[in-house]
Amino acid sequence: MSRIAIGGFQHETNTFSSTPATLADFEAPDAWPGLARGGAMLEAVAGINLPAAGFVQEARSLHHELLPLTWCSAQPSRRVTHAAYEHISALLLDDLQHAGNVDGVYLDLHGAMVAGHVDDADGELLRRVRALVGPDVPIVASLDYHANVSTLMARAASALVSYRTYPHIDMAECGARAARVLQDLLGHPRPAVALEHVDFLIPLTSQSTLVEPMRTLMDQAGRLQQSPLLSVCLMPGFPAADVADCGPAAYACGYNDAMARETVAGLALEVRAREHEFALELYSIEQAVVATTRHAAPRGRPIILADTQDNPGAGGHADTMSLIKALVASNARGVLAGVICDPAAAARAHAAGEGAQVELRLGAGSGTPGETPLVARFKVVALGNGRFTGTGPFYRGARFELGPMALLELGGVRIAVATRKQQAADQAMFRHLRAEPADFAVLALKSSVHFRADFGPIADRILVVEAPGPSIADPARLPFRRLRPGMRTSPRRR
């Protein structure tokens, strides 16, 4: 039995977003638990599709003694504030110091966290942990599929293990793989590490592993992970981060240096060879609305409009209204939209009660340029307390805490509203308000790709819509200043 310290600090930073991540954001629960320490941490993540949960389960099956530290996450947003980063890092390091001698450390990280004073926030945290435990204790970190991997991260950790799916249905499995990698490292020297960056940014909506080219590329990465290699990762990166390490990367570690370097070089070469396949396909609001009017899918097979640029899972605020306004103006019928984050509207709907008519200025509270509220008299169709459990492959087991929620109706459009923002990636979010997504002809979802895991099987057609929002779909439109030399902001077409 080995003594394994386990902790986590997750944030995906959209440096172009307008709202920073504060300590309060990490302390409050949403779909994931709020900040937890010690034994409470193990209870908080249990049963959820999270890397830490998968690690705990697998490590227990390997009969290790687990020493829980600090674990927390926050919704994607602008940089983590200096105060929040230093406070949480200090908690985790203090817990690790008080754990005494440890045989190994596991960290549940994102890999694309940027702090107000540190561009490579994950790498800096790993550096501090390495300085505390010394050069010989194995440190394994699980990373998000969208990690922007730095040389410091690769050097400070003994091994990195990343998700292989987008939508991220394998987060818990990634944690379990990390536990097995750590098991293989115990009592052995540090493995050789290879890392190679790719020189173009990949738009988020082009990164899904449900379609080409990432489906085949990720299968290839999985097949390449064979002994003596311990981990082979292909991470497309999070493109909305203005930092030097932004972008795709291939990584491998193991006990054959040449094999690790050759594997990484081969993966990076294959990504470059398929560059043109990552080109964006976006629909304007007008094109999307026209498509819905011409849509004649069988019952139970809605057309899905992905409102990607206001996706709160990538730094959006979930409150832009342009797409919904256009659907209302077109007299669209059978539309279910959401989830809009508007605490004031949710509170007024609860005060009015189910069945009531209420005048609202819905959405547009975050100040996205050009956005205005949807001002109308809405019917309150259903109310909920925002507490429910995720049932889809991505949010499986997540214990949602979205605050008071309401389902509002305006003409043929029903709109789900919540007090806290969360991307619409689980049908349970609408069922909580007694709305069955398959009963609608059109679903307008504040999400980029994660919705495909739960909503994809019922969809007749999916359109990615370029409606307003801070999570810009095309990285070439972002005002980058800190990318490394030679980095291109969009994939070349043929």
Image: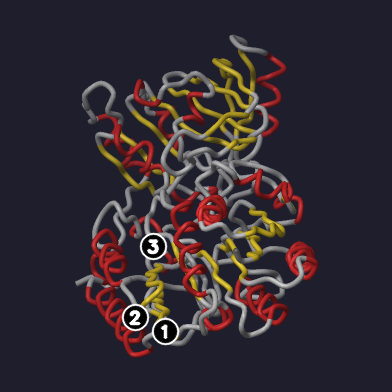
Mark 2 or mark 3: name the one nearer the start of the chain: 3
Most foreground residue, 45 or 203: 45
Residue 290, how many percent across, how many down?
A: 28, 36
CA distance separating discs 1 and 3: 25 Å
Q: Which residue corresponds to mark 3?
A: 203
Tell me where residue 285 appears, x and y as whole percent.
38, 43
Q: Tags 1 and 3 in contact by the CB under 8 Å rule?
A: no
Going by the numbered disc 3, the residue's amino acid type is Pro
Q: Is residue 137 left or right of residue 338?
A: right
Label pair 1/2, CB-CB below 8 angstroms: yes
Report, in whole angstroms, how far the alpha carbon at label 2 lies from the one at label 3: 22 Å
Q: Is residue 325 visible?
A: no
Q: Which residue is mark 2?
A: 264
| Residue at the extreme front of the image, as rendered | 1
Residue drawn at the location 46% of the way across and 87% of the way down: 485
The quadrant of the rendering that contains the N terminus is bottom right
Label 2: few (<14), some or many (≥20) within 10 Å?
A: many
- Residue at the (54%, 15%) spot, across then down: 381
Residue 162 in percent (x, y) is at 45, 64
Tell me the tag on residue 194: 1
Q: How many neighbours does mark 1 have within 10 angstroms: few (below 14), some (14-19), or many (20 or more)?
A: many
